[in-house]
Image (cartoon, rainbow, N blue to C red):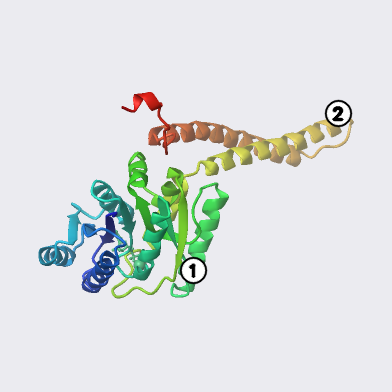
Amino acid sequence: MDTLYLVVPCYNEEEVLPETSRRLKEKLEGMVLEGLVDEKSRILFVDDGSRDKTWEIISRLHQEDPRFLGLKLSRNKGHQNALLAGLMTAKELCDMAISLDADLQDDVDAIDRFVLEYQNGCDIVYGVRSKRETDTWFKRTTAEGFYKVMQALGVDIVDNHADYRLMSRRALEGLAQFREVNLFLRGIVPLIGYKSAVVTYERSERFAGESKYPLKKMLSFAFDGITSFSVKPISFILGLGVLMTGISGLALLVLLVLWLLGWGVSGFGVLCGSLWLLGGIQLMALGMVGEYVGKIYKEVKARPKYIIETFLKDQEERG
Ligand code: UDP
Ligand code: MG
């Protein structure tokens, strides 16, 4: 029987924690009774440097029921880092871990289906929102635009999937090999590989309290996501420079030919052409430097180049 850890990042969630813990405990108990998961399964709350009573609530829960575990970060490090802290702690103790939000927006009843997919041999199971009606129009359109931009930039990212997902132990071990500081889990997890599946669920409204993701945090999250996964913006500059140089060079050439043929040539045209030519050359130079910076960037991240799934060993050596 496999041990399941539920990893829940919490930032100032005193309003929702009592209900969340009750619902998760009920769910876990049910699954243990059904024989779906081992009784050593736990619920791990990660306190991301909350300033309210979140940690008090977590410690009390832990005292009352050993099934609740708590991890307190030294200060607020943001959702993605809190999640990683929880997952890396769980990695040593579980066979699979499911990450979900503290505000009950991720449908708790979908957990069974995640586990069933795991038992079918999947290492990663993505929770995908079937509809976003509970989100505001603004959040919905910006989020959809974000997924489109990411995919256009060549980032392998699952549509409408946030951070509600199951990862097996070896998938977590794969994740641990990514050493980058700019964490964008949604982009990294697909890079780990292994067999994966999708479970759809309906995203409900925040149970209580306010979103901990104000617009500013959301924008910086999106910007981080793009810049830590793609150097295409740099190639775009290079492309623009080449285009500008090409067009203005051609225009100047035409003017030169006309002049040689004895036509009257406008000085304004020559001035404009050379201005654009210079601008183009500068952009091209910038883009070239950028390409190297992009390479350095990739090297510095030192991502694992591969993760081995199975190794059919030499029969004799097995011993
Ligand atoms: N969260 C966190 N650290 C932060 C911000 C948020 O751990 O700095 C947690 C939060 O407690 C919640 C999850 O991340 O469990 C998602 O946040 P929220 O529900 O506020 O985001 P939204 O659903 O509005 O996008
Ligand atoms: Mg939420």
Amino acid carrying mark 1 in the image: Ser
Residue depicted at 35% across the width and 63% down the height: 213
Tell me which numbered mark, 1 or 2, is placed earlier along the sequence.
Answer: 1
Q: Dot 1: few (<14), some (14–19), or many (≥20) neighbours within 10 Å? A: few
SS for dot 2? helix
Inspect the image, locate mark 2, and give the three-letter code of the amino acid beneath it: Leu
Q: Quadrant of the C terminus?
A: top left
x, y (%) of residue 11? Answer: 25, 62
State the mark number for residue 164. none
Front in this rendered view, residue 230 or 248: 230
Which label number is shown at residue 130? 1
CB of residue at label 1: within 8 Å of ligand 1? Answer: no
Q: Is mark 2 within 8 Å of ligand 1?
A: no
Of residue 114 and residue 317, the one placed in the foreground of this image is 317
How far across and how far down the image is residue 231, in percent?
Answer: 51, 41
Q: From the top left corner, tell me how far across and down residue 189 is, in percent.
A: 42, 48
Whether residue 40 sits left or right of residue 150 in the image: it is left
Q: Which label sits in the foreground, 1 or 2?
A: 1
Residue at image location 18% in from the left, 58% down from the top: 70
Q: Which residue is mark 2?
A: 260
Quadrant of res 272: top right
The quadrant of the picture showing ligand 1 is bottom left
Q: CA distance from mark 1 to mark 2?
A: 67 Å
Left or right of residue 87: residue 237: right
Q: Assess whether mark 2 and mark 1 are in contact (beta carbons under 8 angstroms).
A: no
Is residue 159 visible from the viewing direction of this image?
Answer: yes
- Answer whether residue 219 is visible to the viewer in this image: no
Image-quadrant location for residue 250: top right
Q: Residues within 10 Å of mark 2 (few under 14, many from 20)?
A: few
